[in-house]
């Protein structure tokens, strides 16, 4: 069994197209890393409001650079 994964960086994409990024656990911010382990992709996909899709490291870096810091 694989070890649970923890978030290192996150980009939150809002329905209006805004991108917000964070690299820390800071519940007072609008976007924060979770202090809990990340569930398996299948568990996430089983929830109607979420969908996972593959993303390369290069693509993530490009999105990260476009995103604003969480406030």
Image: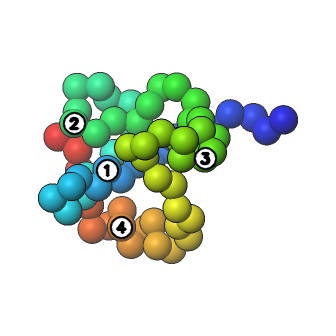
Where is residue 51 shown, x and y percent of the image?
A: 46, 52
Q: Secondary structure at mark 4?
A: helix
Q: Nearer the viewer, residue 39 or 37?
A: 39
Task: Read off the residue under disc 4.
Answer: 63
Q: Secondary structure at mark 3?
A: helix
Task: Read off the residue under disc 3.
Answer: 41
Is 32 on the left-hand or right-hand side of 17? right
Residue at 35% over, 53% down: 11
Task: Read off the residue under disc 1.
Answer: 12
Observer-side mark, 1 or 4, equals 1
Residue at 53% over, 67% down: 55
- Up-down relation of residue 65 to residue 1 (above or below): below
Is 66 on the left-hand or right-hand side of 36? left
Q: Are marks 1 and 2 in contact (CB under 8 Å)?
A: yes
Mark earlier in primary sequence (3, 4): 3
Q: Quadrant of residue 67?
A: bottom left
Task: Read off the residue under disc 2.
Answer: 30
Where is residue 45 shown, x and y percent of the image?
A: 54, 47
Where is residue 18 shown, x and y percent of the image?
A: 19, 59
Mark earlier in primary sequence (1, 4): 1
Mark earlier in primary sequence (3, 1): 1
Where does the C terminus fall, quadrant-wise?
top left
Observer-side mark, 3 or 4, equals 3
Neighbourhood count class around disc 3 (C-alpha, 10 Å): few under 14, some 14–19, many 20 upward: few
Q: How is the image coloured?
A: rainbow
Mark 2–mark 3 Cα distance, whole angstroms, equals: 23 Å
């Amino acid at each position: 069994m694989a070890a649970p994964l923890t978030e290192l960086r996150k980009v939150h994409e809002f329905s209006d197209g805004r991108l917000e990024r964070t690299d820390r656990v800071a519940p007072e911010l609008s976007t924060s890393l979770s202090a809990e382990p990340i569930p398996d992709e299948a568990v996430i996909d089983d929830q109607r409001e979420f969908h996972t899709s593959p993303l390369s490291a290069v693509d993530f870096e490009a999105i990260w650079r476009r995103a604003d810091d969480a406030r």
